[in-house]
Image (tube, helix red, strand yellow):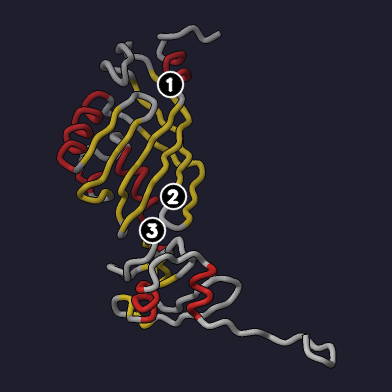
């Protein structure tokens, strides 16, 4: 406040703002002020945030430093999160339901194309955890053969930063033993589930599925409906 009652803006140097944000390694300041791949970063101290502007999107770090989304190999900052462009996420989520539906696609390569080489698939409901593309390929071949008419329909979806979530329904016929359930040859339909996706460099780094096993068991006759 000045003597005449007017507010006076106080401009803090970038170093002070970094200290306020809890950045422990001052050397990262120099990294942030350097080029982030092909993009020169503009660091702005405002509301305890740093913003970087560019045509490729943004790359977020826990230290609240932002940079472009399509950029690879950003400077080392605390718990860096590389974010895909919105259009890329939309295309991947559109492809996701088709790739996982054995009724529309019996080629596991379409699913594998969505995953990083070291990607992890986890079916939390059945306790399955698969790591890497080769193991995931074997799992998909078995799953598609077990229920060749698997059909997924997307109800809702959203993405934020390196995360995406899909709420879906699945249908099929329990022709073979699957997910610990004995084959009955009966149809299950509109079974609700959710997939949580962790994204990295335009690919799925981890997919965790949760679905309503009780409804499946009731519909295929393995559990009383009441």
The furthest residue to the right: 4
Please, what secondary structure does the residue beneath circle 2 have? strand
Residue 211 picture location, percent across and down: 43, 29
Which circle's residue, 2 or 1, is located before the other in the chain?
Answer: 2
Residue 32: quarter of image? bottom left
Instruction: For marks 2 and 1, give the CA distance.
Output: 23 Å
Residue underneath mark 1: 213
Residue 133: quarter of image? top left
Above or below residue 1? Residue 22 is: above
Q: Are marks 2 and 3 in contact (CB under 8 Å)?
A: no
Residue 75 picture location, percent across and down: 32, 71
Instruction: For marks 3 and 1, give the CA distance.
Output: 35 Å
- Bin the neighbour count of mark 1 within 10 Å (Cα to Cα): few under 14, some 14-19, many 20 and up: some
> Could you say which disc has been placed on residue 3 in the image?
none
Please, what secondary structure does the residue beneath circle 3 have? loop
For residue 109, side relative to residue 200 (left or right)? left
Residue 58 picture location, percent across and down: 42, 69
């Amino acid at each position: 406040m000045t003597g005449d009652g007017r507010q006076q803006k106080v401009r803090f140097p970038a170093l002070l703002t970094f200290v306020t944000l809890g950045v422990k390694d001052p050397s990262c300041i120099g990294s942030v002020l350097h080029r982030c791949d092909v993009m020169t970063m503009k660091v702005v101290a405002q509301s305890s945030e740093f913003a970087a502007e560019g045509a490729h999107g943004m790359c977020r770090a826990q230290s609240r430093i932002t940079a472009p989304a399509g950029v690879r190999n950003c400077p080392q900052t605390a718990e860096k999160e590389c974010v895909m462009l919105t259009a890329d996420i939309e295309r991947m989520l559109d492809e996701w339901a088709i790739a996982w539906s054995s009724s529309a696609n019996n080629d596991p390569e379409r699913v594998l194309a969505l995953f990083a080489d070291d990607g992890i698939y986890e079916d939390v409901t059945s306790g399955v955890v698969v790591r890497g593309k080769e193991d995931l390929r074997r799992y998909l071949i078995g799953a598609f053969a077990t229920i060749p008419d698997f059909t997924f329909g997307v109800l809702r979806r959203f993405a934020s930063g390196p995360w995406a979530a899909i709420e879906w329904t699945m249908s099929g016929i329990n022709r073979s033993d699957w997910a610990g359930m004995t084959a009955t040859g009966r149809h299950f339909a509109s079974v609700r589930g959710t997939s949580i996706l962790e994204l990295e460099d335009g690919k799925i780094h981890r997919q965790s599925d949760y679905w309503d096993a009780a409804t499946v068991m009731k519909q295929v006759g393995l559990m009383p409906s009441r």
